[in-house]
Amino acid sequence: MIITVKLFASFRAGRFDIETRDYPEGSTVADVADSLSLPQSELGIMMINNRHVKLDRLLVEGDTLALFPLLGGG
Amino acid sequence: MDKIARIDMGAAGGPKVTVSGLGDYAGLGGRAMTSLIVAAEVPPLAHALGAENKLVISPGMLSGTVGSMTGRLSVGCKSPLTGTIKESNAGGQAAQVLARLGYAAVILEGKPAGDDLYKIVINKDGINVIVDNSLKLLDNYPLVAKLRTEYGDKVAYMTIGTAGERKMLSASIACTDPELRPTRHCGRGGVGAVMGAKRVKAIIIDDAGVTMRPAKNIEGYRDANRKFVEGLRKHPVTGEGLPAYGTNVLTNVLNEAGGYPTNNFKTGQFAGSSKISGEAQAELEVKRGGSATHGCHRGCVIQCSGIYNDKDGNYVTKQPEYETVWSHGGHCGIDDLDTIARLDYMDDNIGVDTIEMGVTIGVAMDAGIIEFGDRAGAIRLLEEVGKGTPLGCILGAGAAVTGKVFGVERVPVVKDQALPAYDPRAIQGIGVTYATSTQGADHTMGYAIATNILKVGGDVDPLKTEGQIELSRNLQIATAAIDSTGMCLFIAFAILDQPETFQALLDMLGSFHGITMTGDDVVALGKRVLSAERDFNKRAGFTKYHDRLPRFFYDEPVAPHNLTFMMKDEELDDLFNW
Ligand code: SF4
């Protein structure tokens, strides 16, 4: 299935900003992070289609997944 | 910090300085000091620009020590913008220097009769108030440049630009950074107008000949500070994210979460967001020979700031904060960092709050004065503010006044203070803080974004109402306490997540005063400050009906989540329940 993956901040280094990628049915957020060698301990904010999700969330065709490290500001 | 200076600007025969001990205010600093003095001494029905109002300047409890992050300066008064009590704090060098000179507070009182303009020089020999009409109508950068020829580079300057002199409701007080740029502002609530009303243009603070404030328990303090710094370095937000990208790293986060107010709160996502994101900004700063990592005062280990140069490598301004990039950027449909940096410089120079000014320009765009996205138009409007033309004076009075003058219905203010960069319909928790804060809409009063969006210090769903009241309450209490310590609020990211770093902060406070500090003491301090602020507001005529968001947040759903602000009035009324 086709998923749009967006990476931010330090996650972009050596990877990409945005990419359309193919994953097997039944893939989770954790699977995508693994495929990009993003250690789970470094994942801060995860969103699918503008909503926060957890690592075990199943992806479906056409989803946009955004992954950020832990960030702050304000 | 064992003395309080009172400067009666209206004394017969010229300003008169009186220095006394701390009395009832012993042990206080920062926001606790300014708010308790204002609550006790300013008549709540006073006109904010009148002689009865007081401008209280106070370093934090730990300012002027070897402790890291302790350089926050609080300024308090009755706000001319909101009519509530106000505490506005800034970094820069002023707090450290003033604290080392021993002043727990410097209070400007009264109001001179004539139109002479004054500067105040504070050094180890005392306080001098001097007429200097040559400073009239100078903006902050030229003003500081002129003062430096006389007082040099080893002092801290607090100044107002022309906006403060003209008593505009958006006027700020600038504090110089370590390189003497007037870039760190007590921005919110028109505190610069109160300084202008007292006819004080500049305060020059010189700590030559004085030393750091020693802790009661020197060893204990050093040890606690070391652990505290370790904790800040170790946490991903304070150790990596903020130093590398600054606060503007939030642009992409908020846009992705659908909580990025765009074109005056019409939608929650901005097509141009990636162009003005923290990632893009940091890359540009480094490429142009500026810097993406800079501290606003000596002793900051997080260094969230930076230096923004133009394409030829010349300094434009300090790294614009997320709120500024938003207010002058997405809020106005502007997707160009160079325009935003130029506006940031102009705000600092004229001396206005970047949030209030950006939001006001967006409201003016909604009124059709200029189009959304009009870069040159936005600069032109801000030039009007700097010149003090009739249009400039309307805009300088802030979003609420501008909305009224031009007949705009969608005006994002609470208690007449502009909302910052987070849509309360997509992030219900921050809406609770906007509505109930003692000082009008202000994200820093109870930063629910941390838990709602960033998932630091817990996890509360931003799209639901559950848990938001308690969250905002606890954050408002903790913030009131932190704002009193002199610590930069960004330490909160680390202390919310790491109990040992919170303990190190308690140990810093305790060992400095030779006592034991507990979490309960911090909560008690925060509640004491908030209670005093609420009480002042009540006596100034504020009721629970003022603790509400503007109507459009309740009846205009915003994309992409298509929600309204859903918190019930009774829930909001339950926030201050002690
Ligand atoms: S973290 Fe940023 S705002 Fe806080 S003290 Fe450091 S430079 Fe200043």
Image (cartoon, coloured by chain):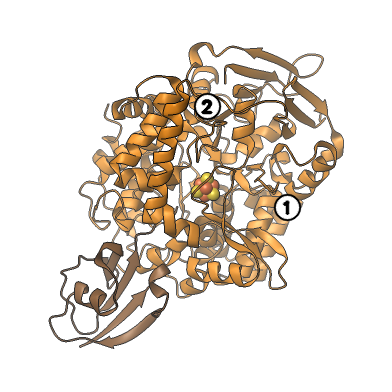
Chain colours: A brown, B orange
Instruction: Judge from the rendering whether residue A24 lies leftward or rightward of residue B228; answer left or right.
Output: left
Chain of residue at mark 2? B
Instruction: Judge from the rendering whether residue B333 lies leftward or rightward of residue B493; answer left or right.
Output: right
Disc 1 element: helix
**Cα separation between marks 2 and 1:** 29 Å
The reply to whether callout 2 and callout 1 are in contact (CB within 8 Å) is no
Instruction: Judge from the rendering whether residue B280 lies leftward or rightward of residue B229; answer left or right.
Output: right
Give how far across and how far down residue B233 sits, in percent: 42, 50
Which image quadrant for residue B2? Answer: top right
Q: Is mark 1 within 8 Å of ligand 1?
A: no
Q: Residue at x 39, y 25 (%)?
A: B510
Outermost right residue: B134
Placement of B572 over or under B528, stated as above or below: below
Along the viewing direction, whichever of B136 and B48 lies nearer the viewer? B136
Q: Say yes or no: labels 2 and 1 on the same chain.
A: yes
Chain of residue at mark 1? B
Along the viewing direction, whichever of B75 and B306 lies nearer the viewer? B306
Where residue B217 is drawn, which disc sits there?
A: none
Instruction: Judge from the rendering whether residue B4 lies leftward or rightward of residue B575; answer left or right.
Output: right
Give how far across and how far down residue B262 sits, in percent: 45, 66
Outermost front residue: B219
Disc 2 element: helix
Give how far across and how far down residue B96 sits, in percent: 60, 34
Query: Which quadrant holds the C terminus of chain B?
Result: top left
Circle 2: residue type: Thr
The residue pinned by badge 2 equals B34
Q: Residues within 10 Å of mark 2 (few under 14, many from 20)?
A: many
Circle 1: residue type: Gly
Outermost left residue: A26
Placement of A62 over or under B235, stated as above or below: below
The residue pinned by badge 1 equals B386
Q: Residue at x 25, y 66 (%)?
A: A40
